[in-house]
Image (tube, helix red, strand yellow):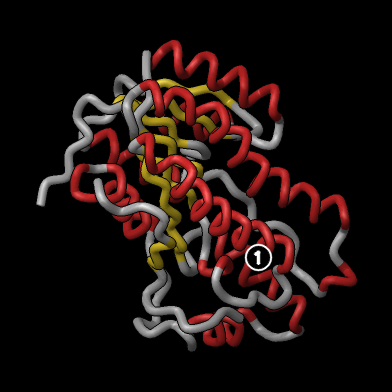
């Protein structure tokens, strides 16, 4: 099946690397016109250079003024909007709740939840004007399971799932579909940092920690950014035109988190 986004305008947050970059790459191949952001200027520039015809601006998604400036520019440049991918997020601190720094807790909420709100509130009027479209929010398996030692991250991802379901009902009459993707552990530098931090917090070796993390995964491997990006492409294409309000697991059969 060929999934096309020809003629569609898309915004992708945190497109400088990982899942965000892979979404941008697949959307570009499918014919979408892209306006991207990332907090890392070098990474963003590299993504834009690799995707001819795309544009982007450096943005801290937790800063409402920066998001508003980005949206003003993006909507003017694109002259309309069909797709919003709320991908930006941070891992947040690892540790027992009594040792979590309140500033780190707040930063995790600001990026993972407030950032989604800041982009969505500005995107919805443009999507309505376009006669409909698709919003995809990146949640996590941590938005359906308990996630010991990762309470700030888990709190935000449960929040993403809740707002996704709510907006799917709120915006359905305007032809706007809203879905969440819940990746499991995604292979790459970020999960390696989390693995190291959890091993240290638990007082065990990294290989033992890796084995524990893989134990509840049916396929016994981490998913890839391409796995997640492919789901986003499906949801935003005509093939996903009747899919909304869903929390879609891309997690290799994860049964619980450690």
- Image height of 143 relative to 240, above or below: below
Q: Percent from the top left, x then y, of residue 83?
A: 37, 34
Instruction: Give the secondary structure at mark 1.
Output: helix
In the current view of this chain or complex, which residue is farthest to the left? 1
Residue on which disc 1 sits: 154
Of 110 and 247, nearer the camera is 247
Res 50 visible: no
Quadrant housing residue 97 = bottom right
Q: Residue at x 63, y 66 (%)?
A: 194
Q: Residue at x 77, y 77 (%)?
A: 201
Picture quarter with the C terminus = bottom right
Q: Percent from the top left, x then y, of residue 221?
A: 39, 77
Q: Is residue 104 left or right of residue 180?
A: right
Q: Is residue 130 left or right of residue 194?
A: left
How many labels, in total?
Answer: 1
Quadrant housing residue 237 = top left
């Amino acid at each position: 099946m060929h999934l096309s986004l020809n003629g569609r305008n898309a915004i992708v947050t945190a497109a400088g690397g990982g899942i965000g970059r892979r979404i941008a790459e697949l959307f570009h191949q499918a014919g979408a016109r892209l306006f991207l952001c990332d907090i890392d200027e070098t990474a963003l520039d590299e993504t834009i250079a690799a995707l001819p015809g795309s544009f982007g601006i450096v943005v801290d998604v937790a800063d409402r003024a920066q998001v508003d400036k980005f949206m003003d520019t993006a909507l003017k440049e694109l002259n309309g909007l069909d797709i919003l991918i709320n991908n930006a997020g941070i891992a947040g601190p690892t540790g027992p709740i009594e040792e979590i720094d309140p500033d780190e807790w707040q930063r995790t909420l600001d990026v993972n939840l407030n950032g989604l709100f800041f982009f969505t509130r500005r995107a919805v009027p443009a999507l309505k004007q376009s006669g409909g479209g698709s919003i995809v929010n990146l949640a996590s398996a941590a938005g359906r399971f308990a996630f010991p030692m990762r309470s700030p991250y888990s709190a935000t991802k449960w929040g993403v799932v809740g707002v996704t379901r709510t907006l799917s009902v709120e915006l359905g009459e305007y032809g706007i579909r809203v879905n969440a993707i819940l990746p499991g552990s995604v292979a790459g530098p970020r999960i390696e940092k989390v693995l190291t931090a959890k091993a240290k917090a638990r007082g065990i070796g990294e290989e033992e920690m890796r084995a524990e993390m893989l134990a509840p995964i049916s396929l016994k491997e981490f998913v890839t950014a391409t796995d997640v990006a492919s789901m986003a492409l499906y949801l935003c294409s005509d093939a996903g035109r009747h899919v909304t309000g869903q929390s879609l697991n891309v997690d290799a059969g994860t049964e619980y988190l450690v």
